[in-house]
Image (tube, helix red, strand yellow):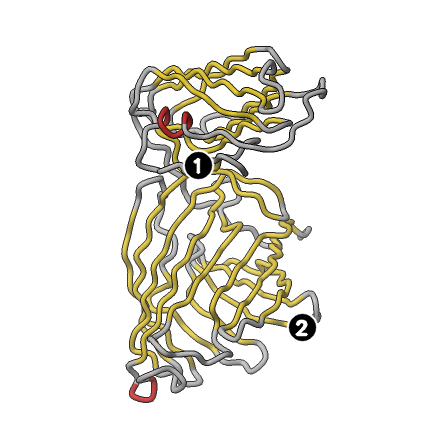
Amino acid sequence: MKGMGKWMASCALAAMLCACGGGGDGDGNKSTAALNINTSGSSTQTQSIPTGQSGSLTVKSGDFLTVRTTEPVKWSIALTSNATTLANQTVSDTLLSGNLINPSGDTIALVATSISDPSKVFKLLLTLLPAPISTPTYNAVPQKVGEVATFAETSLRLSGTGGTQHIAYTTSAISNGIATIKGVNIDTNTADQNYTQDQDRNRLTRTYMDNGNVCAYAPKRDYYSFPLYVGKGWNSTWNYSCAAGYHETANVQANVVAYEPVTVAAGTYNALRINYVVTYTNSNDALLPNGAAGNATYSETITAWWSPDLGRIVKWVSNYGYATGFSNPTYMKVYTQELQSLQTLPQ
């Protein structure tokens, strides 16, 4: 896009938007031009403003705003407070989106002017309400026997090769707060891996169904610490050991960084975005440096989106890091999961 200025997260919103225009070959004869607005967070709202018209909208600090135009425009803005910022922003000549943030509130006049025909002007008056006194918190959602979550799981190896498989995870039993999850590869109709997890969906055991190897997380793989809320962080350590002899120690640093919409094949969900940095030590993987001595290390940097409505992850992206120079082509570089469908089988 021509003439696009860079948006810097640390800049005030006014400075950011005044620097953003865009080029493009719009059709100045379109009569259906419109400014389409969607918000999520404290409430879900939609609005469409035709050419030459004005609209108004009230949102709360932290809400996610998406403004789309049907043709390239130049954005401009006037606001009362230079303290207003737009986090997680995306901007182009047809899109402006992000979380509007000012704990004290603000009044914002947003104007979009068509690049191909400056006589086409769209105006939106935004009232940004102060942040709520308390931060919304989210608790675990009870698991259900018969629930089937199907994910597309994509692997990219250090060699650059990879592929996607589709795994259906069925909650087959719940006893004393412990759920049993059975995984089936629906592409090949073969059993994949089974898990047990606590009521918060923290994993306790893992069984490889192709060879029966059972592995345990002690005391648990601590990826969820309820209640969850934006700004929460925690650290945890667990030991992972398998009957076949493998072992490692994991330390996780977790931070809930945003509440935002995320779109996957199963739909669009408002979700908490959680960042994890996991450091693995004491690994006895003989193919890793120092693994033969039981002192291998590697890392995993994860971005996950957890849906409060579903009580589960809907998208997961892991990036793996190894010691300098390690390049075994079979080892994982990037692993992703995206929810394809969620259903509950009749009991």
Residue marked by disc 1: 89
Expressed as whole percent of the image width and height from the top left, the position of residue 27 reads 69, 26
Question: Between residues 198 and 294, which one lies in front from this camera angle?
Answer: 294
Q: Considering the numbered disc 1 on the image, is that residue within a helix, a strand or a loop? A: strand
**Which residue corresponds to the image point at 60% horizontal and 57% vertical from the top-left?**
151
| Residue 177 drawn above or below residue 1 | below
User: Are there few (<14), some (14-19), or many (20+) residues within 10 Å of tag 2?
Assistant: few
Of circles 2 and 1, which is in front?
A: 1
**Which residue corresponds to the image point at 35% horizontal and 50% vertical from the top-left?**
225
Expressed as whole percent of the image width and height from the top left, the position of residue 130 reads 33, 20
In space, the residues marked 2 and 1 are separated at their CA atoms by 42 Å
Question: Between residues 262 and 344, which one lies in front from this camera angle?
Answer: 262
What amino acid does circle 1 point to? Gln
The reply, left or right, for residue 71 in relation to residue 141 is: right
**Which residue corresponds to the image point at 34% horizontal and 63% vertical from the top-left?**
278
Expressed as whole percent of the image width and height from the top left, the position of residue 57 reads 49, 16
User: Are there few (<14), some (14-19), or many (20+) residues within 10 Å of tag 1?
Assistant: some
The answer to which image quadrant residue 291 occupies is bottom left
- Mark sitting on residue 190: 2
The answer to which image quadrant residue 186 occupies is bottom right
Quarter of the image with the N terminus is top right
**Which residue corresponds to the image point at 57% horizontal and 76% vertical from the top-left?**
209
- Mark sitting on residue 151: none
Q: Residue furthest bottom?
A: 292
Q: Considering the numbered disc 2 on the image, is that residue within a helix, a strand or a loop? A: strand
Q: Earlier in the sequence, mark 2 or mark 1?
A: 1
